[in-house]
Image: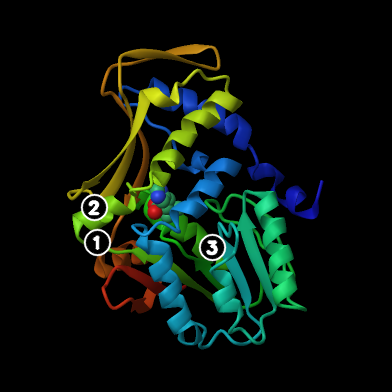
Amino acid sequence: MSKATERAAPFLRQADDFAVSVLEGLSRPKKSLPCRFFYDAQGSALFEDITRQPEYYPTRVEVGILTANAMQMLEGALGETVLVEFGSGSSIKTEILLGHMRRLHAYVPIDISESALIDARERLAARFSGLNIELLLADFSHPIELPPELAPRPKLGFFPGSTIGNFVPAEATRLLRAMRETLSPRGKLIIGVDLKKDVRQLVAAYDDANGVTAAFNLNLLARINHELDGTFDLQAFRHAATYEPFEGRIEMYLVSVKDQDVWVAGRKFHFRAAETIHTESAYKYTIEEFHLIAQAAGWTPLRVWKDELNLFSVHELVA
Ligand code: AVI
């Protein structure tokens, strides 16, 4: 077992968690599946592909904001800081910050995918020679104990991508509180948050013309088929994305195109024609709405950076 795996062992129950969550979610009167299970190898590749679709503005716009403002974002963090990234994945956006950090003590990417962590370390080590990279295999939704030698140093958290939007506001608050705990004392967080905007633009971002988001959504059923002995016919479900203005969120669904039975892990589930499985919510915030959530989690919001079209925001929060 690697050093990273050892540290994270208590958090790594993905396999059991998947079976229990799927059976529980499909047994509800309104069927649902948690979006955290989108990201098997195929799902992660499809997500990367989504970020390259013309309609999916968040990645492109956030990269632009980070590139234009990285120096400012890092003001006051140029000392012996520890950069902690939550759900680091491929660490692509981190390179923008790392390019501007001269006296970084260590970079700590946190992710539940050991292969993503190892790949990212390889790429970053090649580009930033001498960079101290401490992989942390863990679920960032709980407070995480950093290695003791790093804990007392000033810490800069990084949580890009508007992943915070995939949590309902109460969970988002809990998550931000856990991050504050992980980063304390002397913590600061740079976090990407997608903004409310024209409904057509929002829906298009989650229902691209090339059908990549549809394939990403349907891959969840393929994953259930492979890992839980499921019998989902992927042709018998279609992808749907809607914007709920009252909740301020995109909702993604898989819609049964006919009356059908599906078996999962030896249990039978019935789907009526047009019955839905809710697979993801993506909350969109105004600056003020996000400030309230951050404050409820004990953070003090400071600066905010946006693009010219007000599509996306990057916030600076201090503990
Ligand atoms: C990872 N997360 C921020 C993406 C989002 O925009 O909510 C996931 C996604 N789902 C469909 N497209 C992208």
Q: Is residue 51 visible?
A: yes
Dots 2, 1 in contact, CB < 8 A? yes
Residue identifier under label 2: 248
Q: Earlier in the sequence, mark 2 or mark 1?
A: 1
Calculate the distance from the C-alpha at mark 3 to the C-alpha at mark 2. 28 Å
**Three-letter amino acid code at the position of disc 2:** Gly
Side of 265 relative to 202 (left or right):
right
Three-letter amino acid code at the position of disc 1: Lys
Name the residue tied to disc 3: 181
Q: Is mark 3 within 8 Å of ligand 1?
A: no
Distance Cα–Cα, label 1 vs label 3 = 29 Å
**Dot 1 corresponds to which residue?**
196
Q: Nearer the viewer, mark 1 or mark 3?
A: 1
Residue 250 drawn above or below residue 234: below
As drawn, 39 above or below 194: above
In the rendered structure, the answer to whether residue 68 lies left or right of residue 92 reads left
On the picture, is 242 further left or further right than 174? left
- The residue type indicated by label 3 comes to Glu
Q: Position of residue 103 (x, y in %)?
A: 67, 86
Q: Picture coordinates of residue 2 (x, y %)? A: 80, 51
* Nearer-N-terminus badge (3/2): 3
Q: Where residue 81 sits: x, y (%)?
A: 63, 79
Q: Image quarter for residue 144?
A: bottom right
Residue drawn at (44%, 52%) of the image:
50
